[in-house]
Image (cartoon, helix red, strand yellow):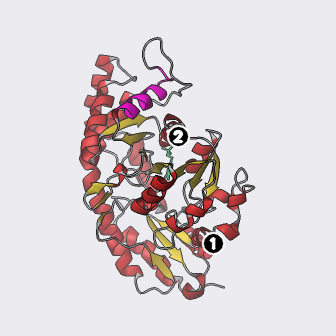
Amino acid sequence: MKQVSSESTFDAAHNLNGNIFVTRPDLPPLEDFIPYLEQIWDRKWLTNNGLFHQELEEKLAQFLGVKYVSLFSNGTLALVTALQVLRITGEVITTPYSFVATTHALNWNDITPVFCDIEPETMNLDPKKLEMLITPKTSAILPVHIYGNPCAVEEIQKIADIYGLHIIYDACHAFGVNIDGQSVLNFGDLSVLSFHATKIFTTMEGGAIVTDNKKLKDRIDYLKNFGFADETTVMAPGINGKMNEMQAALGLLQLESVKENIKRRQEISVNYREKFKDIPGIGFLTDAENVQHNYAYFPIFVDDQKYGMQRDQLYEAFKQEHIYSRRYFYPLISEFPMYRGLASAGQENLPVASRISRQVITLPLYPTLTEEQQDKVIAVVKNNCGAGK
Ligand SMILES: *Cc1c(COP(=O)(O)O)cnc(C)c1O
């Protein structure tokens, strides 16, 4: 099978302009996908728990070291459904330092988000600031393993146990992350994954809920299929969140390369860290000894005083070199119009998150990022040190 021409045209344009994007999906060779398509065409079973869907749920559970996986058409619907299956209501304590879908999932369920500040070391929800936000209306905690770095899972669990709160982890960044050899997805009541095109394991669009409870898994499966528990029983106003067979087939192929993908990301991350360690005012995350990381993102944190240039000036300097970094996560979710009026959204309540979101730049990181491209990224950071006006 020949490569389709649009792909080579894209590559030519890509090289011609020398553009470097923050991420690029890791797709299998097209010819490897064709046999899967042939099977789908033969079977004419396109969605509704098809054979590839079943196979991917099993293989993912095995690969990730978890009990049950329920696949979804995307991570946002998985988040919305995770909140519904546990019948979460009232107020939920969450982090403002995340992708906006985390809080939107609460909004879609008429739940009031309560923003909690983050830890300066991990950029995750700070368990020390959690307890004082609990009210009689609080029913759950929705933390995020940001950049794939595990939250303080034990401390959060301890507080949840005392107050009788559910924990749903937004684990959209945390595919394949382990703590002491155990999947990070096994903490809390439920964990939610995203397989969006920008994530390290992708089904183009896609997501999942992870649980160790068979009854919950069943009810999640009902909810993603309009609430049908059987032919005539509708147990709740469910949604259509089903993953189709083409997405599941791509997922099966992705499973074969995701380990290699993570290894390449690790090599690039190690190179970045080595080159940035002596540049004043450039902070970055390091590995925790008991954690198997997935190197999903490479954020740097610019201390403008020490670095001698402002974050946004450096961001523009990257653009000048056709490097399209991103500011994940700026603005804070609590700064968007639909949330900024909340009592917990004030900057004075979120000093760490406010500072970090004004320092962050997420650098290009993906398996096919060449050494030459990495050098270009590093050169921009080096050359602009002290160059601010
Ligand atoms: C990607 C992402 C989501 C949303 O997932 P989709 O699959 O794009 O709907 C939610 N939360 C976080 C932290 C994410 O990174």
User: Helix, strand or loop at disc 1?
Assistant: helix
- Quarter of the rendering occupied by the N terminus: top left
- At label 2, the amino acid type is Leu
Q: In this view, does 124 lie to the left or right of 117?
A: left
Which residue sits at x=44%, y=49%?
A: 10
Question: Looking at this rendering, what residue extends furthest in the right direction?
Answer: 341
Please give the count of numbered marks on the rendered protein: 2
Task: Give residue 127's position: percent from left, percent from top.
Answer: 50, 64
* Callout 2 crowding tier (Cα within 10 Å): few <14, some 14–19, many ≥20: many
Residue marked by disc 2: 83
Q: In this view, does 215 lie to the left or right of 104?
A: left
Task: Give residue 345's position: percent from left, percent from top.
Answer: 69, 60
Residue marked by disc 1: 351
Q: Disc 2, ligand 1: is the CB inside 8 Å? A: no
Region of the chain picked out in magenta, as a range: 215-228
Indicate which disc residue 27 carries.
Answer: none
